[in-house]
Image: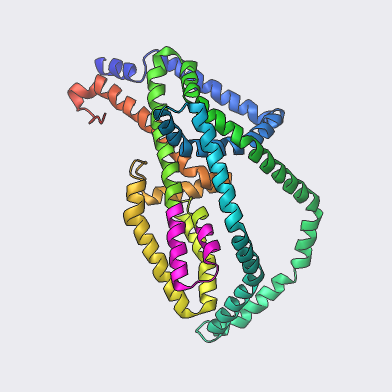
Amino acid sequence: MESSNRFFKFIGGKNIFYILAFFILIGITIFIYTKVSFIFHPLKVIFSTLAPPVILAFIAYYLLNPVVDILERLRIKRIWGIIILILGISGALTGIILLTAPAIEAQVKDLVEKFPSYLSQLGNSMTTWIQNSFLGPYYDEGYNWLMERLGELPEIIGNYITTGFQGVQNIASTITNTVVSIITFPFILFFLLKDGKKFKQFTVKVFPPRFRDDIKQILSNMDTQVGSYIQGQIIVASVIGILLFIGYLIIGLDYAFTLAIVAAVTSVVPYLGPTIAIIPAIIIAIVSSPFMLLKLAIVWIAVQFLEGNFVSPNVMGRTMKVHPLTIILVLLIAGNLFGILGIILGIPGYAIVKVIGGYLFYKFKKRYNKYFGEDRGKYEMEE
């Protein structure tokens, strides 16, 4: 009897009935929402419009807020520090774009024009290799199968044409959202940098006083995890781009600057990004010469070695410790659920979930030690 009473207190006592009622109400709300979801379409439109600039602003906030804090410690008023920083970055970016735009434009234009020929040469080389290998007897059969499928291409194109107007509408909507994001992003960033602490205080005051210490702790952990991850990942991606650019220049690979920029941008996504970035470089290297492919492999291995053993361990030291397999699974799941946005935000989202889950588990262990620790052994607590 004593054991059952203790277990009843452990799971919440009489409060368990209120908790169950709360979850039942949530379930009923979700069920009703699935039946009348069309009513909330305007809210979906508002959210999809506001989400991109807000996400961009938060990423920039985590990058720039430490600099603003330093300026504030140097006795520069926060608002003036923000203005100086934004104007300085805007001027620097404008100068960089003006200086590098002609070279990037020339390389991109030339690459776009020649890339189909690169693919054609690669295809011819692969065809020759297949015909001369043990797969040769199956080549004609595979080629005929492919030609039969290409015969269905006009019908497929016709189906796409019938939905062409919807595609045009989607493109127009994407352009509109992009313009809105570019215009509103600086204003959101300004107020985040100016009033970020006030937003946090306001969020804490929304909760009952009893839970405010817990909420403060959770928000602080989230801020540390997400902020350090974003800052670290941007730095690591930039270093990878610079190292690859130097390596490409040394081996004489064509379009070194453009390929390095692509690598830096895609490397923001761990594991998946570098894999995507190396594909165009491999195609260009194969077409150039087998020796160029060997040199590219040496450069890539060297950059990955430096990044894995020196850059990431030092830059990402304060971030969450996540197993590589976990990162890959998170990226796969987030990508299937939310597309490219899920791939970009999957790891920060996982960091938030991990912080909340870890804190709840910490509370669970404390509660268990309180009711069962004396006679059944205590959890080891890490403060």
Q: Specify the quadrant that holds the C terminus.
A: top left
- Residue stretch in magenta: 238-263
Q: Residue furthest bottom?
A: 132
Task: From the top left corner, tell me how far across and down residue 338 is, in percent.
Answer: 57, 44
Q: Which residue is drawn at 41% across and 18% down?
A: 212
Task: From the top left corner, tell me how far across and down residue 100 is, in percent.
Answer: 58, 58
Q: Which residue is drawn at 37% across and 19% down?
A: 213
Up the image or down, 208 lies above or below 317; here it is above
Does the magenta segment cover residue 284? no
Task: From the top left corner, tell me how far across and down residue 252 is, in percent.
Answer: 48, 73
**Which quadrant holds residue 19?**
top left
Q: How many marks?
A: 0
**Which quadrant holds residue 72?**
top left
Task: From the top left corner, tell me how far across and down residue 283 is, in percent.
Answer: 54, 71
Up the image or down, 25 lies above or below 178; here it is above
Up the image or down, 11 lies above or below 280; here it is above
Q: Residue at x 52, y 53 (%)?
A: 265
